[in-house]
Amino acid sequence: MVGRIFSVFALSMMIMFGHLRVANAAPEMKAEAGWPSAGLLDAAASQNLVLKTNLQWFFGGRAQRGWYLYTPLIGRLLGGDHDAGSREFAEGIYRWQQAYGLNSTGVLDRDTWMSMVVFFQAGRAKGQVATRDSLILAPESDFYDAARPLELRYVDREAYAAYKRMIDAAAEAGTRAAYLKIVSAFRSPAYQAALRRNSPNSGRAGLAINSPHFTGRALDLYVGAEPVSTSDPNRLIQINSPAYQWLVKNAHRFGFHPYFYEPWHWEYRP
Ligand SMILES: [Zn+2]
């Protein structure tokens, strides 16, 4: 009898410790194998649906809310346009977190989002003011405002050639002619300073002191709604335009890369 009780006890202890060991080992094993469980992904997906519009973060000296305005760019980072509330999206986030050494939860939380912002911001065009020789005058017909004065129609020569190739491809893909016209190209430091004086509240994200537009290689392109307003409702219209979505998927083929915060602003960095 005592022997039987002992063996039942020993067996339960073995099961218990065996179970504990498996449980302790499980997260590491999962991380190594890279297989998040369905339960983890489902929990992450429901959190992602909330954070999509509610995550609080700061950028350009302003409080920001949610990452829903960046879903096309996030989709490109993750390699697929999955709904923010889907398991596939959570899995994409999980893999991003693994690659960047972040706590892998599948939740697009603040740390994860800020790692994406750092990624988006890396390698942006800064500095070098364009020289006269590097600029060419683009025709009025390329501009959103067909009456744009001559001194505001200069573009970097190479960026302009790439832009023309890009809009030809966009037209072939069915983008309507009103879209992707140039709203703004080269801006001289003097002109930029005047813009800032006229709109002192635009913030750091709005009118940079060291603007990529000085290079002649940054183009603001028309992607719908108010051409260059950073208000969230305005940007929501823009990111849903077929023209913007085409750019997100194709502009890199022509050497153009997005500024994540402004759907209209594209930089030529071949
Ligand atoms: Zn711009």
Image (tube, helix red, strand yellow):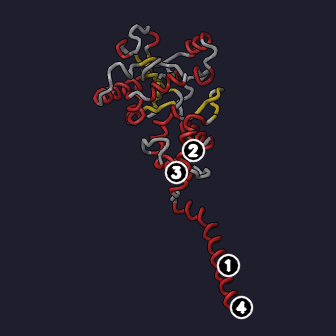
Please tell me how crowded label 3 is: few (under 14), some (14-19), or many (20+) other residues with Cα within 10 Å: some
Q: From the viewer's side, name the closer residue of 257 and 171.
A: 171
Q: Secondary structure at mark 3?
A: helix
Please tell me how crowded label 4 is: few (under 14), some (14-19), or many (20+) other residues with Cα within 10 Å: few
Q: Earlier in the sequence, mark 2 or mark 3?
A: 3
Return the mark for residue 42. 3
Residue 172, compared with residue 50, is above or below; it is: above
Q: Is residue 114 left or right of residue 160?
A: right
Q: Earlier in the sequence, mark 4 or mark 2?
A: 4
**Disc 4/disc 2 C-alpha distance (Å):** 52 Å
Tag 1 residue = 13
Question: Mark 4 or 2, which is nearer the eye?
Answer: 4
Tag 4 residue = 2
* Residue at 37% over, 29% down: 242
Looking at the picture, which amino acid does disc 4 mark? Answer: Val
* Residue at 71% over, 91% down: 2
Tag 2 residue = 47
Please tell me how crowded label 2 is: few (under 14), some (14-19), or many (20+) other residues with Cα within 10 Å: some
Q: Earlier in the sequence, mark 3 or mark 4?
A: 4
Ligand 1 within 8 Å of the CB at mark 2 = no
Furthest residue toward front = 1
Label 2 near label 4: C-beta < 8 Å? no
* Residue at 52% over, 51% down: 42
Looking at the picture, which amino acid does disc 3 mark? Answer: Asp
Label 3 near label 2: C-beta < 8 Å? no
**Disc 1/disc 3 C-alpha distance (Å):** 33 Å
**Disc 1/disc 2 C-alpha distance (Å):** 38 Å
Provide residue 118's location: percent of width, then percent of height. Answer: 58, 38
